[in-house]
Image (cartoon, coloured by chain):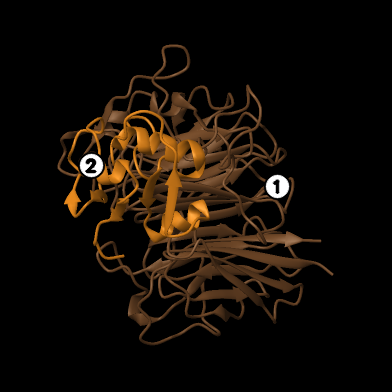
Amino acid sequence: MSKVRVLVGTRKGAFILESDGKREKWEVSGPHFAGWEIYHVKGSPADPNRIYASQSSGWFGQVIQRSNDGGKTWEIPGGGPQPGPGGMPAGQSNKFAYDTSAETGKPLTTHQWYDGTQHPWEFKRVWHLEPSLTEPDTVYAGIEDAALFRSTDGGKSWHELAGLRGHGTGPKWQPGAGGMCLHTVILDPSDTDRIYIAISAAGAFRTDDGGQTWRPINHGLHSQYIPDPNAEVGHCVHHIAMHPSRPSVLFMQKHWDVMRSDDAGDSWKEVSGNLPTDFGFVIDVHAHEPETIYVVPIKSDGEHYPPEGKLRVYRSRTGGNEWEALTEGLPQSNCYVNVLRDAMAVDSLDSCGVYFGTTGGQVYSSADAGDSWSPIVHDLPAVLSVEVQTLP
Amino acid sequence: MIRVTLPPHLRTLAQVGWEVELEVEGRATQRSVLDTLEAQYPMLRGTIRDHVTHERRPFLRFFACEEDLSHESPDAPLPDAVASGAEPLVILGAIAGG
């Protein structure tokens, strides 16, 4: 029987939740890396036992962790002394050095600071790890301050895809409330050269040549909170989702507005429709129905909790515009948690499972595509990310 | 032999106890001690000082013999008591909530 493994990153460690295909009884392991902020944990589609985790701390900086047995044991790639001459130097797995070399890099410019002045680029942490769809040792890292890195040796060493930061609009990028983070990395399953990324607050970008060159794909976004609401860059994109069967159709939860693109991001149109508020962080797509999408509306940018204290997932079966509230099993009074941008995921079992985590420490699951919900756990540290693996 | 005391999270990361003992070649300075520490425990690279600049991470401080050495030159000799192993070099995390 199939089973699912839910990978949860929290403010104080990682947790792994496992169940069989019924998704009724759960085994919980953790905390892994107790006391550290775990921004993201994600498994390799090519080898589900290979899992990467981003572990960070304001005191000690960044650590990359890797598991080869489905999260039972972990290692820091290249964390031990490396045997023999010529091996990758040890202790490089947390070295995210911007590429300023003349050969492959770009000069390290400045970006816009909160007050409008220019500020130097500084590495802070890895927000998102996106393993390759085909190579377990290849993984992308979206970092703060925004840049995209790639490892082809299982996380032992990292190299920046400097064409993104060198696009030329860097001085107009600015941090959102969470920092200037590259938080979304989407690999096109039909075209290995095409990658989408999103940055708060710069917007969405796409490469069609494997990461060498990038262009902003923000036409149609309208953000009244920036000086030029229709600017080429500067939009606070919160998350983007794609269904693998239709890689040119993208769904976006922006700071405000839920958006849709049917041309690989070349243009966007708003599909917020009848949502009670179109502010939010997460967005995801049903595993088997490419027009069924999910968001969790949050009251506003100033009040990061559900409107009316009711935690509601909204589902659209029409690719946006027409939304229904999903409330069964979710608290409908006095609920003031947030659901952060990487904290929703779907499994690919026949009856699609949907999962999300809250800043209140709950991880909710639905085994019936959102019709009903129940908490798998309800007292974890604040949840930063949720990913799901569907296992044979 | 030089003794170094690590904060709890770094002990967990390096899978060591309260204190590590290092054989440091040449004069004992912050730089030579940390170079030796990182060579012996590569997983600690980047967690105490920056990978590129080698500057001390801002929320960490270095103490020895009840003195704050955090702002000393990394090439300044450590106190004799540290160099002899009588006292440890203490790496502390700032009290900053969390």
Q: Is residue A179 left or right of residue A349?
A: left
Question: Can you tell which chain is drawn orange?
Answer: B
In terms of depth relative to the viewer, which is nearer, A37 or A360? A37
Q: Chain of mark 1?
A: A
Going 44% across and 78% down the picture, which residue do you hit? A311
Q: Is residue A177 left or right of residue A366?
A: left
Asked which quadrant contains residue A144, the reply is top left
Q: Is residue A92 above or below residue A386?
A: above
Please, what is the three-letter code of the amino acid marked with disc 2? Answer: Pro
Which residue matches tag 1? A245
In terms of depth relative to the viewer, which is nearer, B17 or A134? B17
SS of the residue under disc 1: loop
Which residue matches tag 2? B79
Q: Residues within 10 Å of mark 2 (few under 14, many from 20)?
A: some
Please, what is the three-letter code of the amino acid marked with disc 1? Answer: Ser
Instruction: Tell me where residue B6 appears, x and y as whole percent.
Output: 38, 54
Instruction: Tell me where residue A342 appears, x and y as whole percent.
Output: 49, 57
